[in-house]
Image (cartoon, rainbow, N blue to C red):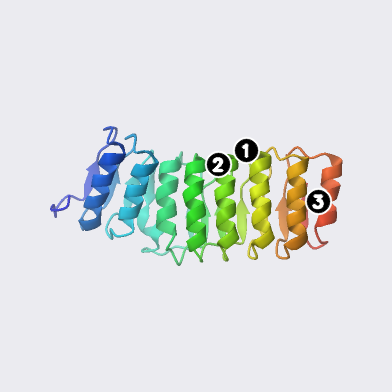
């Protein structure tokens, strides 16, 4: 691939390439100027392998389609080379591998405004890299990660991204099993984030103590206008405490 000037499509489906093989393919992609379609699904790439591919795509200018887990990603659109404001990738069965590559691509995208990844399987590893992308990206305003199994760890990474991000205004983290620990990380982010206006934390098994952390954050946050915390494990006292913590302009959905 480093030398070839004719091959435009390559299918390496289910070959147990692994992280080391992905590293070499990534190196080839950095210099290859003809390949447009690459299929690498079911190759045991792991987090490291996906990172190698993602880093290569920051340099490669020709690849338009990459399949890591059963659905081809629109690479040029994710990178902003073919500029679009909205990308819909909901319910595509994307795993952390695609999540890592998506994060690498959008980190420098100056055009994309809305990214919908709901009902996938990004997990905490994918969320980690998306959180890192949020620290850099200053264009994305809407991110939907509903039902991706990111867990408390994933929520921590997203929260760390939110502490730095100054562009994202709408974030959906509903049905991600972030539990109390994850909610506390999001609450911490809300204390310093001055951009987010709409946040959905519904269906995350959040309890009374974590609701208290969110309430404390809302006393300091002056920009959030809509917060959904439906379908959690809050008692009446916790709900009342949240109501007392927010100003009357906030649409609090319990």
Which residue has dot 1 on it?
Answer: 177
How far apart in space, not on screen, are marks 1 and 2 (Cα)?
Answer: 7 Å
**Within-10-Å neighbours for mark 1: few <14, some 14–19, many 20+:** many
Q: Which of marks 2 and 1 precedes in the sequence?
A: 2
Mark 3 and mark 2: Cα distance apart in space = 25 Å
Question: What secondary structure is marked by label 1?
Answer: loop
Q: Is residue 62 visible?
A: yes
User: Which residue: 59% across, 46% down?
Assistant: 155
Q: Residue at x 43, y 63 (%)?
A: 109
Residue 81 image-quadrant placement? bottom left
Please say if 70 is above or below 110. Answer: above
**Against 122, is 138 above or below?**
below
Residue hosting label 3:
242
Question: In the rendered picture of this protein, how many numbered marks are placed on residues?
Answer: 3
Figure quadrant of residue 77 = bottom left
Write down the residue under mark 2. 150
For mark 2, give the secondary structure: loop
Question: Residue 193's x, y, as percent?
Answer: 64, 62
Secondary structure at numbered mark 3: helix
* Viewer can see residue 197: no
Determine whether, in the image, residue 238 is placed left or right of residue 210. Answer: right
């Amino acid at each position: 691939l480093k030398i070839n000037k004719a091959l435009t499509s390559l299918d390496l489906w289910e070959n147990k390439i692994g992280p080391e093989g992905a590293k070499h393919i990534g190196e080839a992609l950095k210099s290859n100027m003809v390949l447009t379609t690459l299929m690498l699904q079911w190759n045991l790439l792991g987090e490291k392998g996906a990172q190698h591919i993602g880093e290569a795509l920051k340099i490669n200018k020709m690849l338009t389609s990459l399949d890591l887990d059963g659905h081809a990603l629109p690479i040029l659109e994710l990178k902003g080379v073919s500029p679009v404001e909205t990308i819909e990738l909901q319910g595509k069965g994307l795993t952390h591998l695609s999540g890592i590559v998506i994060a690498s691509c959008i980190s420098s995208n100056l055009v994309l405004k809305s990214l919908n990844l709901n009902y996938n399987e990004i997990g905490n590893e994918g969320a980690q890299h998306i959180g890192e992308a949020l620290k850099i990206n200053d264009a994305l305003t809407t991110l939907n990660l509903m039902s991706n199994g990111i867990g408390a760890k994933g929520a921590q990474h997203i929260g760390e991204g939110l502490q730095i991000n100054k562009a994202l205004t709408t974030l959906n983290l509903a049905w991600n099993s972030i539990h109390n620990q994850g909610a506390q990380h999001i609450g911490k982010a809300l204390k310093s984030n001055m951009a987010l206006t709409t946040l959905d934390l519904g269906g995350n098994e959040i309890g009374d103590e974590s609701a208290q952390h969110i309430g404390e954050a809302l006393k300091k946050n002056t920009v959030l206008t809509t917060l959904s915390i439906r379908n959690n494990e809050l008692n009446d006292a916790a709900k009342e405490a949240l109501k007392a913590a927010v100003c009357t302009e906030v649409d609090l959905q319990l």
